[in-house]
Image: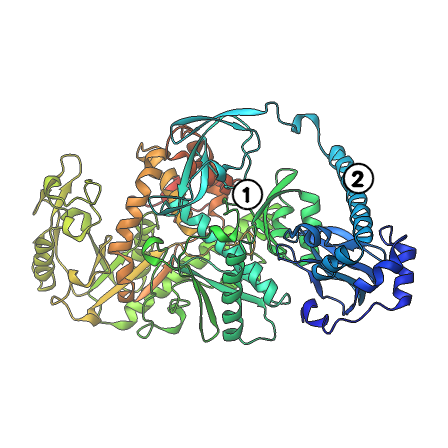
């Protein structure tokens, strides 16, 4: 029940309460009896939010009995007791509430409404003047105390060196005052594309951040892949704030992203049904957008952050802070919730792009849908039907296409990045590596058993997005198939590319090697039909140096009765490859991709697309001579090809293999840190390179000595026991 519903009909303040105000309040000391006719008596139970930060109000309160907490954003500003007053700026100036007041215990209050204040001004202007004077004196004392406290906290080096700065905004020079918010320098949108953050010297920062030095400033829009992260993180924080307002007892965490949205994990459900909770939280999110609720960037010391999150039960973030490298941590706060500033967030809820987000409930599963799915790059897609699979290899979370936390990780106590770091510090790294690799081998063995168990399989097609570990997976699957008495014969779709000059081009005019039209589908299907008819076929070979196709320049392939054809390539799930050539029961399709994503806190997680990009950067930098900047620049088109040519066909897969290794970022960090530092700050790829450096910095370093030669990770860092 809100305070406003408890104030009617208005009741006069009892004389005993007036006496207490005169005794305890400096404002009421001399005017209490004259003020009494204009005050209303209010009694509120414990835990009531008397006033809420950011709300509109036109009344002030005097605290007669009881104790309350004063809070701003996620900061506890202390307790107030009898004689305190609050809300004077709302009363006189109509200002939004700058902080929240929450009853620690039952409260007795005296309320002065705007209507009563105006009546006082007409009936007793001298009293109104005395009250206003007393409030100004009180505010002056508070301001003096605050100034002294801030002065004690600030060092001289924290003060700005210059009053004005020279800034280039979209190549236009301007002089601005130090401390100007970046949002004031940039438009709200660029040709209809919402501006969600600023690029300051190619680093993405919040629009609310003040500018403190000469800089080059550009807008970061929602359509940019880094801009999408800003939108999604801001929407996640808004969800937490809305849930807290609907039911503070519910503890919510966002699960791993699936491109179109994220699952919502209710770690501590409340009294509401899931459907009711989803409806009320969605409505509250839209209310907060209408209120333009602020997202405040705050710099906390690690010690105060640990203390705060220990009280709030945020175990994921608390564990991470125990291995934090610096003395301060950047947080973003909204509606009493605080999360890591892993990516910039919008300055307020009102800046959220007008995408039609929604919360969906499907049985026990709850999903936050981002909204405009045509502008949000998917990380996965609809998971395959599992009706044909043995139970132990069915893909998890088939409805949503995302994985749940692995039971073995829970057994090891690795439920977050912070918990992983702590396990490494305790000397558990070799065990983590052994168990991770053991899980991979167990899954590969089960897939091989499923293939053998079907008894009719003649071709295995393996597909997955870039840097999923397909090459090593194929080598390890080959071993397990041989154990089952099945001899795989390899065939790569890459050898069936058409001549380079015949390759289709994408929207940017570049060769689109991910398109199905880049494959000589007629030649491929002709060869496959002959192979399955029992003929010996000279397969194709593609010369990547000259860009020429040699239709019969490859090795000769013949399938014996114990053989299966093993096809690898981006189009392996596409039914057009084999439709009309083989019955469905003779085809076994496998989708491979890293999927496990440990959380940093309740909004931020390791993004599996970042894992794949880091794998690719490390592999190509020391194995193919391609630098990090070029790989980052190429990444959006790679992702676009995956969206068009892999994810639409996930329903064709018979098995899913999660190629994640929970320890891999700690190893990749050894190589990636330097490769990312090689990206020049003026290069367009720097914004992503800088973010990736911040990402790997939060993970404990693991040297590759214990990584086995058969590991998928060896495909990217080198030292594999397989020949590629």
* Residue nearest the observer in this picture, 561 or 99: 99
Q: Which residue is mark 2?
A: 145
Percent x, y of residue 237? 53, 55
* Residue nearest the observer in this picture, 118 or 443: 118
Q: Residue at x 79, y 54 (%)?
A: 85
Percent x, y of residue 418? 59, 50
Q: Are marks 2 and 1 in contact (CB under 8 Å)?
A: no
Above-or-below relation of 651 to 88:
below
Within 10 Å of the Cα at label 1, are there few (<14), some (14-19), or many (20+) other Cα atoms?
A: some
Q: Residue at x 42, y 44 (%)?
A: 188
Within 10 Å of the Cα at label 2, are there few (<14), some (14-19), or many (20+) other Cα atoms?
A: few
Q: Is residue 594 left or right of residue 339?
A: left
Q: Which residue is mark 1?
A: 698
* Residue nearest the observer in this picture, 288 or 365: 288
Residue 181, disc: none
For the N terminus, give its image quadrant.
Answer: bottom right
Percent x, y of residue 118? 72, 57
């Amino acid at each position: 029940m809100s305070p406003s519903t408890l104030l009617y009909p208005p009741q006069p303040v009892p004389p005993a309460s007036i006496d207490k105000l005169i005794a305890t309040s400096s404002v009421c000391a001399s005017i209490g009896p004259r003020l009494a006719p204009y005050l209303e008596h209010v009694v509120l139970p414990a835990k009531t939010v008397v006033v809420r930060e950011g709300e509109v109000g036109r009344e002030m309160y005097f605290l007669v009995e009881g104790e309350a907490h004063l809070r701003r954003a996620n900061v506890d500003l202390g307790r107030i007791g009898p004689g305190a007053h609050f809300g004077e700026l709302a009363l006189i100036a109509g200002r939004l509430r700058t902080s929240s007041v929450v009853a620690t215990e039952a409260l007795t209050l005296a309320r002065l409404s705007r209507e009563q204040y105006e009546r006082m001004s007409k009936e007793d202007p001298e009293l109104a003047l005395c009250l206003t004077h007393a409030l100004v004196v009180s505010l002056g004392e508070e301001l003096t105390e605050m100034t002294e406290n801030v002065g004690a906290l600030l060092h001289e080096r924290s003060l700005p060196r210059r009053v004005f700065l020279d800034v280039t905004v979209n190549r236009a020079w301007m002089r601005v005052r130090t401390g100007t918010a970046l949002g004031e320098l940039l438009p709200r949108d660029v040709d209809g594309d919402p501006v969600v953050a600023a690029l300051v010297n190619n680093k993405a920062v919040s629009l609310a951040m003040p500018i403190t030095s000469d800089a080059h400033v550009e807008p970061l829009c929602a359509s940019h892949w880094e801009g999408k992260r800003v939108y999604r993180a801001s929407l996640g924080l808004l969800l937490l704030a809305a849930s807290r307002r609907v039911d503070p007892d519910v503890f919510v965490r966002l699960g791993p992203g699936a491109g179109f949205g994220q699952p919502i994990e209710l770690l501590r459900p409340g009294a509401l049904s899931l459907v009711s909770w989803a409806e009320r939280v969605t409505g509250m999110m839209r209310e907060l957008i209408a209120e333009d609720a602020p997202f405040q960037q705050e710099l906390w010391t690690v010690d105060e952050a640990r203390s705060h999150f220990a009280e709030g039960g945020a175990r994921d973030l608390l564990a991470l802070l125990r291995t934090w490298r610096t003395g301060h941590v950047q947080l973003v706060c909204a509606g009493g919730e605080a999360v890591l500033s892993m990516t910039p967030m919008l300055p307020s809820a009102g800046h959220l792009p007008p995408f039609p987000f929604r919360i969906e409930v499907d049985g026990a599963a709850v999903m936050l849908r981002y909204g405009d799915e045509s502008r949000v790059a998917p990380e996965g897609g609809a998971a395959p039907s599992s009706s044909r699979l043995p139970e132990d290899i069915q893909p998890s979370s088939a409805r949503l296409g995302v994985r749940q936390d692995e039971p073995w990780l829970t057994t090891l106590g690795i439920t977050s990045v912070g918990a992983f770091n702590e396990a490494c510090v305790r000397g558990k790294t070799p065990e983590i590596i052994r168990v991770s690799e053991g899980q991979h081998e167990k899954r590969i063995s089960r897939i091989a058993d499923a293939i053998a168990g079907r008894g009719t399989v003649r071709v295995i097609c393996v597909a997955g997005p870039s840097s999923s570990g397909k090459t090593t997976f194929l080598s390890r699957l080959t071993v397990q198939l041989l154990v089952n008495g099945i001899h795989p014969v390899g065939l790569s779709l890459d050898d069936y590319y058409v001549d380079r000059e015949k390759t289709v081009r994408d929207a940017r005019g570049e060769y689109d090697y991910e398109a199905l039209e880049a494959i000589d589908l007629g030649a491929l299907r002709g060869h496959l039909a002959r192979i399955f008819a029992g003929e010996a076929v000279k397969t194709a070979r593609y010369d990547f140096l000259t860009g020429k196709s040699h239709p019969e320049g490859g090795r000769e392939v013949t399938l014996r009765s114990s053989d299966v054809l093993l096809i690898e390539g981006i189009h392996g799930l596409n039914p057009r490859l084999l439709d009309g050539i083989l019955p469905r029961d003779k085809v076994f399709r496998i989708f491979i991709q890293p999927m496990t994503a440990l959380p940093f806190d309740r909004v931020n997680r390791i993004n599996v697309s970042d894992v794949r990009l880091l794998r690719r950067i490390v592999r190509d930098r020391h194995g193919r001579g391609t630098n990090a900047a070029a790989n980052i620049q190429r990444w959006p088109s790679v992702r676009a090809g995956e969206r068009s040519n892999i994810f639409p066909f996930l329903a064709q897969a018979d098995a899913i293999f999660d190629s994640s290794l929970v320890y891999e970022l700690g190893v990749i960090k050894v190589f990636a840190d330097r490769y990312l530092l090689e990206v020049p700050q003026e290069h367009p790829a720097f914004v992503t390179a800088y973010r990736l450096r911040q990402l790997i910095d939060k993970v404990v370093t693991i040297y590759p000595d214990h990584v086995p030669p058969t590991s998928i990770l060896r495909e990217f860092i080198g030292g594999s026991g397989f020949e590629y």
